[in-house]
Amino acid sequence: MVERRTMLKGSLGAAAFAGLQACTPAARVAHASTPPPVPAPGKKVALVPIRVTPDQLIDVKCCIRPLRAAGPNLGTETIGDRLIVHNYGHGGSGWSLSWGSADVAVGKAMSVLPGEIAVIGCGIIGLTTAVLAQQYGLKVTVYARDMIQRTRSFRASGSFTPSSRVALTEPAGPAFGDLWEQMARFSWKAFRTCIGLPGKPVEFTDSYGLYDAPPQRRTRTGDPAITDSYATKGVPVQNSEFAHLDSRIRDIVPPSIALPPEENPFNAPYATRASQMHFNFPSYAHMLLTEFFGRGGQYVARDFATPAQFAQLKEKVVIHCTGYAARDLMQDPSVIPVRGQTGWLVPQPDAPYSVHYRNVMLLSKADGVAVMNLNSNPPNLGDMFGVGNSMELPVRADIEAGLKIIAPALLPAASA
Ligand SMILES: Cc1cc2nc3c(=O)[nH]c(=O)nc-3n(C[C@H](O)[C@H](O)[C@H](O)COP(=O)(O)OP(=O)(O)OC[C@H]3O[C@@H](n4cnc5c(N)ncnc54)[C@H](O)[C@@H]3O)c2cc1C
């Protein structure tokens, strides 16, 4: 195997030097805005291989995506004399849609011209909603069982995936696409304002897909032999039931391009590359909390046993953002658990890129290398992976098995 040090020599030497400069805040800003090395056409980019030995595995997190069949609930209701605006049920897209969804919810709250509001929940949805409401001039108190670092949001992986398990086409209805697009575009613009900030709360890196055979376009058509569906089972039964909306924002999200063999640096015969936006959880949370408290926000630790307790709050307008917990709290069985698990390797800043191969994903960010192993029996479940599973205990062996699958493909390709 080629030594990491050997591979570092050459084009990535400059990046290593930049890393040494990252001791001062000013240098960190400069480092964060340095674009990744772009290889000359026909040349392989000199990548440092991601180290995937089990000794690098420092954490395994498990979490439930709150898939809501009709898409996120952004409806309103009154409890006592309080206006409740809902903002929950974002599936595998909560980080990605956070700003756009907050904009819709805060807009509804503003319709009664409140001076102050309560936000229930302090995951990515609640905290973003709180900050956006402050930006619109409202005084905000967040009431929640846990602050963001202890929520399910912190157990995600952290990429811009705005239509990942966000809704099912039939129950969501034809109007959902427009709403989704509005939220995705609003969020994208908001995240763009965070690029290059110290600590890299949001960054772009290259994402490689590796294949043993020429990659095929995934078909989204349903199997006509399967007659059951969400309507009969209460959970989706095949991939084609999910709303796939990414083509609506093709103009802003970088596409995936096939790499010619002479540009493929990996030990797999076929490769694609795309630029992908990622979120680094600790610095992103720090950024949001700093703004929230800096604008005079109040945080109150509180556990609500029933929605009736919302009416006991002093604020007349409440935005409710409890994520998967809304299934029980609001008695909303259309919120479907979708289990997901990530392993975390020690951060590897000299190897800042993502790879997926044979249903295993590696996502190397400033906050660590996230590992997801989507193999199971049967493999290739696609969007159905984890659907209906609310088991939230991590299984380290699954992550270690994934590392074994992807390791051989990470070896550098033989020189042409
Ligand atoms: C493995 C995995 C990977 C993912 N990757 C991505 C990704 O790459 N990109 C992306 O966009 N999304 C991703 N997601 C989805 C994303 O994590 C969720 O959509 C998002 O975290 C939902 O956030 P939330 O704020 O609604 O809920 P939560 O994070 O669950 O926050 C809920 C808040 O409500 C509070 N609360 C709950 N019940 C009560 C109560 N009764 N009283 C008081 N407070 C209460 C909690 O304490 C918490 O503060 C992923 C999910 C998983 C599982």
Image (cartoon, grey):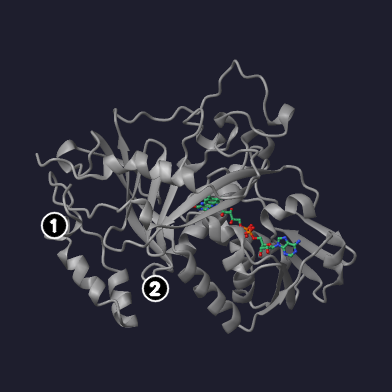
Residue at 31% in and 43% down: 407
Q: Is residue 205 above or below residue 121?
A: above
Q: Is residue 162 visible?
A: no
Q: Nearer the viewer, residue 48 or 1?
A: 1
Residue at 77% in and 67% down: 303
Q: Which residue is denoted by mark 2 in the rendering?
A: 197
Lateral position of residue 83 relative to residue 129, left or right: right
Which quarter of the figure has residue 232?
A: top right
Q: Mark 2 belongs to which amino acid?
A: Leu
Element at label 1: helix
In front: label 1 or label 2: 1
Report x, y in % for residue 25. Answer: 34, 81
Report x, y in % for residue 34. Answer: 26, 67
Q: Is residue 355 above or below residue 190?
A: above
Among numbered discs 1 and 2, the one appearing first in the sequence: 1
- Label 1 CA crowd tier, 10 Å (few <14, some 14–19, many 20+): few
Question: Ligand 1 shows up in which quadrant of the image?
Answer: bottom right
Residue at 72% in and 74% down: 301
Which quarter of the figure has residue 310?
A: bottom right
Report x, y in % for residue 172. Answer: 66, 40
Q: Is mark 1 within 8 Å of ligand 1?
A: no
Number of the label disc, if any, that sits on residue 6: 1
Q: Mark 1 belongs to which amino acid?
A: Thr
Labels 1 & 2 near each other (Cβ < 8 A) = no
Number of the label disc, if any, that sits on residue 68: none
Q: Nearer the viewer, residue 141 or 184?
A: 141
**Residue most toward the left?**
416
Q: Disc 1 and disc 2: Cα gap in Å?
A: 31 Å
